Image (cartoon, rainbow, N blue to C red):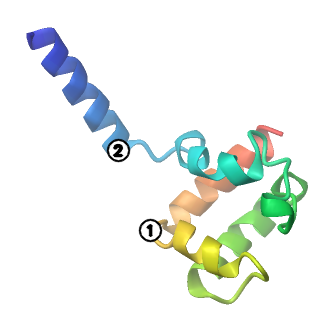
Amino acid sequence: MKKIIATVALIATTSLFANGGDVLYKKCAGCHGIKAEKAALGKSKIVADMSKDEIVKSLQGYKTGTYGGAMKGIMRGQVASLEDKDFNALAEYIVNNK
């Protein structure tokens, strides 16, 4: 029983502090594809074709409401809780995992 409790506590603690690009990207993959190779809902740019800087700037723009077309409303909600460090981690993960 102690092992189960310790394992659950470890998993919970790890997920609370995990903010690597791989972890953050999991919620993006459903629309953008495993390797960011898809146009989300057939409307977005293909993120894998973007540079790290372009990805970061677009995520920042979605958060502030200064970027985006048809997907602007959806993406603003997706990035609302993220910070610049998260945008950088996501961009780094995407460009290194094409």
Q: How many marks?
A: 2
The answer to which image quadrant residue 66 occupies is bottom right
The answer to which image quadrant residue 60 occupies is bottom right
- Residue 47 location (% of width, % of height): 82, 57
Q: What residue is shown at x 69% (from left), y 80% (from top)? A: 72
Task: State the mark number for residue 17.
Answer: 2
Residue depth check, mark 2 versus mark 1: number of the one nearer the observer: 1
Left-right relation of 65 to 35: left
- Residue 92 location (% of width, % of height): 69, 49
Left-right relation of 59 to 19: right
Label 1 Cα neighbours within 10 Å, binned few <14 / some 14-19 / many ≥20: few
Left-right relation of 13 to 81: left
Which image quarter is the N terminus in?
Answer: top left
Q: What residue is shown at x 23% (from left), y 19% (from top)? A: 7
- Residue 81 location (% of width, % of height): 44, 68
- Residue 8 location (% of width, % of height): 23, 25
Which image quarter is the C terminus in?
Answer: top right
Mark 1, secondary structure of its residue: loop
Q: What residue is shown at x 78% (from left), y 41% (from top)? A: 35
- Work out which residue is located at the far left of the displayed protein and give it: 2
User: Along the polypeptide, which appears first: circle 2 or circle 1?
Assistant: 2
Residue carrying label 1 = 81
Query: What amino acid does circle 2 point to?
Result: Phe
Query: What amino acid does circle 1 point to?
Result: Ser
Compared with residue 77, is residue 11 higher up or lower down, i.e. above or below? above
Compared with residue 71, is residue 52 higher up or lower down, i.e. above or below? above
* Separation of residues labelled 2 and 1 (CA atoms): 14 Å
Mark 2, secondary structure of its residue: helix
- Work out which residue is located at the far bottom of the displayed protein and give it: 66
The answer to which image quadrant residue 61 occupies is bottom right
